[in-house]
Amino acid sequence: MSHLGTLRAADTSSALADSGLLKGFRKPPAEALPRVWWHWMDGNISKAGIAKDLEWFRDAGVGGLVNFDGGFGLKQIVDPPVTYQSAEWRDAFKFAMERAADLGLEAGVAASPGWSETGGPWVAAEDGMKKVVWSETWVDGGRTLRVTLPRPTDVAGPFQDHPGEADVRYYKDACVFAYRVADGARPQRELEPRMYASATKASATAPVVSGGSRGVKLDSAKLSSGSLKDVTNLAPPTADEPTWVRIEFPRAVTVTGLGIAAGTSAALQDVTEFGTVVEVWASKDDRTYRQVAEGICKDEQRTLFLPRTEARYFKVVFKAPGTPAEVPYYLPQPTGAEPVPLRSLVLRTAPTVHRFEAKAGFVQAPDYYRIDTPEEGSAKAVATSQVIDLTKAMDDEGRLRWKAPRGTWVVVRLGAGLTGHQNGPTTEAATGLEVDKLDAGRVRAYLTTYLDSLQKATGKNAIGARGLTALLNDSYEAGPQNWTDDILKEFRTRRGYDAGPYLPALTGTTVGGPAESDRFLWDWRQTIGELLTENHYRVVHEVARERGLKLTYAEAQESSRAITADDMDIRRHADVPMGASGNPCAPGDRLGERYLVDMRGAASVANVYGRDFVACEAFTFGARNLMPGDLKPTADQILLSGVNRFMIHTSAHQPQDDGPGVTLGGIGWFFSRNETWADRAKPFTTYLARCSYVLAQGKAVKDVAYFYGQEAPAPALWGPSRRQPDVPLGHDFDYVNADVLLNRLSVKDGRLVTRTGMSYGLLYLGGASERMTVRVLRKIAALVEAGAAVAGTRPVASPSLADSDEEFRALVRRLWGEEGERDRVVGAGRVFGDVRAEEALSSLGVAKDWDYAFDADDPLGWIHRRTDGADVYYVVNRRAVRTTLDVKLRATGKAVELWDPVTGGVAPATFRTERGRTVLSLDLGPSDSRFVVVAHGTPGKGTAKAATGRVIGVVEGGWTVAFQPDRGAPASIELGFLQDLSEHQEAGVRYFSGTATYTKTYRAPGREGGGRVWLDLGEVHDIARVKVNGADAGTVWCAPYRVDVTDALRTGANKIEIEVTNSWYNRMIGDMQPETKTPVTTFVGQLWDLKATTPPEPAGLVGPVRVEVVE
């Protein structure tokens, strides 16, 4: 409502006065309170600090915590540091768990030290995450061969011998096979190449060494060897002058692909397409070149398909990289001076699988269907009949004896190496290998050791039912894994055919044909994903239950595809599925699109699988200088995604009392007892809890089950420039995946239903559903025959090699009919082909759940739940300006009320019932939100008294401002008028952080009639507590900054005190000023982009302050 209609917490009249819904809204229970990440950083731990942290959590309205043992190499303020699992650490951990239980706080712990994922120093090499490694020996057949096959690398890292995090060695043989290639094909190293670069540069500060038109000679043998251990630094390309490498051969060669490792990457599992653009050119005479391919290269190897090309000279041209949409502030920012590190540059002569490293699961790709290996220009693929198993022909020393048929053969010795990924970030004492996540036995053994170590600290009475009660799998950041000991057996069991004839595709060679190899590799990734889901996430949940823990939480991977599995499948193996919100958003903006998908995915898991709570890692990035009012737009978008439990990121453990104190290296929101506003946090957490409570009641109301296909995780399908699915405004949806389709959906009365009570009017095929397996297609056909409605473009193919193309085509014809059919009756159901969801829903008679007219962007966000006694819509004004609109709701009832989650106030709304819909007007201020509650009963109408108001006085003139002591400011100043303190001429005021108390005497005029008296503070930075004549009138943390002073303000003289608190941000900048001799702040973390020249943020009471009467 308008500011004149601000709902007071004291308003009590309600049609639902006796309901548990209203009672829980007014006083949220513990289950609705937000939780916090509680990072213990770099051994900076004290029991005194633990006690104060936990007591503050309770007092600040926090319901629980998840403990992390973190490490970012921060400075030590506890000396000596408390080492992980030392006697001192165990004592502190036991104390923390027992004290949390005494205070009624839910206490959890991450599934490993650090936050990702399941690893530690007790994980042996043979139990670590594994990758495929291999060596190749090219031979000419027609004779009996006696050759020693090179042992593949034992270097731990992401791909072959690319070095990784861990200095550990491991290799285990798996199989040996040979495949035949075209006569004359040879590896590049045998073709005597010579390589030249246009220019090199040893480092970012070194000079550029130019080779002129001929180029600087490179070590061709090293770059042709396939080894990734060494780096040759090329000069960075510019927009005007690209960098090139020319490859010369003594004679013309025929190539089919290019393997290249060049460029930088923030992390090897990074899945964005930002990188160095490369062009591949070919020439027969070194004078006239033609372009044959283009791609993007990174530090991890990428292999690009080349149309079959015969030439003697090749040039690989590196273009200046584009600027990514966003480089997070905590990562190195590119300057353009960095050289291009070149590890390998190999032209292939065997038939090439495009981007095989991603398809085989070494790295990830945002969209696999966009990197199909082309049929046109492809070299003749290896025939499956020409792949020969030679495993038994090699002895333990690697000696092979084989009577090779005629032709050119590549003998591959393939085995398992380690990815080398370690848990973290944490301290050295807590760091070790990540466990093999595809092996249930190893995951179980890992967890047993881990939980035993925690129980050794807590004792039996502070773990399980009391004390430590929850286990968290945080966002998956352990990198890819594509091998485990039994994977070939599991592949045959799950896919129904033998992987052996297709194993060359794991090394980049096409078998059977481009599509055949791509489909095999899809099956390979599916097997990995299923093993990860079942043998890791399911086992984590099972072990936690066996150990008596009450709750498991599980995130997937937030905003990208760093995991080879379906994110909904992962999170269904948890009591509380989780998402993450990423960077905060300003009023009028949206959160990152992939984060919105991630959170909705978590909510969809809860809806479909019957989970009560949906959690969100909230405020992770870019929030360190923000205050609660700044975060309300972000919190509201989190709630609109279906979240009903906030996990605030982060509240680092504070071993000392100086502020802001210890941080997670400067990442996350600063939310701890050492914040300037720590004693004013509860109004914000209460708002979160009110919303969370209401949005956990009843069932979600959705119209559409949105199938996003079988190339998950879903967040990878919607990039920054691509909005969420094309479900029409006014209808809401849940995501569904293959498991939901196959095992959870049935049909009742023409609607899709689940055992958990969800109901959908339409199954929409979107995302990556242009390809689907025959098994899924069969189930869709069965649902349609039973009466379901399906809309979406007809699928074009199965992604799986195991499927029958004939059956696939028959099912598609049965459902979609002939090309161009738009509305087809099949059995008792309907199939809408090439029809938008909006048209299909309209044709089905599914009315909009939420409807209103607007002129431009969609200003109101909403989410709908239905309880036994009411339909509840949470409505958010996403605009930065006031918005007034008439809305129509599909729900009807006897009364409509507006519930204000900020104040707890409740008021009746004016409404009418019209053609089976509830019609009412909403007037919402910038970033304002309300619950619209429709009480069940005979549909009717209601008229609420319109609020009218008038200003009866302006609090003008001078103010005395007293500053919190020991903050670098004077004890007090006199202001002739209100102003932004960050613009004050005195440095101590300009850089002040903390609470400034504004005091003045105000003579209030007499007033006639009734109504309530409000003190409107105008512009405030950032939290205000108001006292009138010594009486506390309340604390306000977001706009509109208004408090009810009816019972405190009297005619005549009144003492007004307004305590205004801002963040530590300004004082931190002040401490960087050259004239500052003694810093006020104690900061343990990275400051990132904060520096002395950073302007301070607005601070204090700006006003104007007015007295209003509302009747």
Image: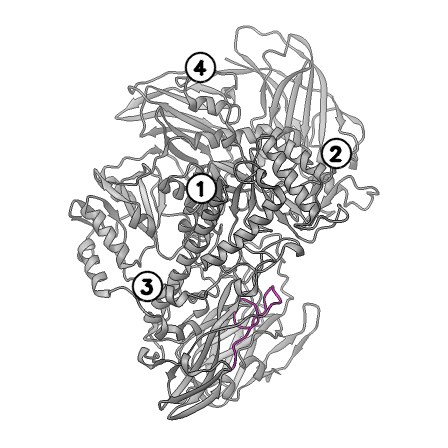
Q: Is residue 160 magenta?
A: yes
The residue positioned 46% from the left and 33% from the top of the image is 877
Query: How many residues crowd mark 2 within 10 Å: few (<14), some (14–19), many (20+)?
Result: few
Query: How many residues crowd mark 3 within 10 Å: few (<14), some (14–19), many (20+)?
Result: some
Separation of residues labelled 2 and 4 (CA atoms): 47 Å
The residue positioned 63% from the left and 24% from the top of the image is 1104
Residue type of the residue flagged with mark 4:
Ser
Q: Main secondary structure of the magenta part?
A: loop
The magenta stretch is 150-168
Q: Earlier in the sequence, mark 1 or mark 2?
A: 1
- The answer to whether 491 is drawn above or below residue 16 in the figure is below
Q: Earlier in the sequence, mark 1 or mark 3?
A: 3
Mark nearest the camera among 3 and 2 is: 3
- The answer to whether 351 is drawn above or below residue 127 in the figure is below
Q: Earlier in the sequence, mark 4 or mark 1?
A: 4
Residue type of the residue flagged with mark 1:
Asp
Which scheme is used to colour this image of the protein?
Answer: one colour
Give SS at disc 1.
loop
Find disc 4 in the rendering and name its residue. Answer: 13
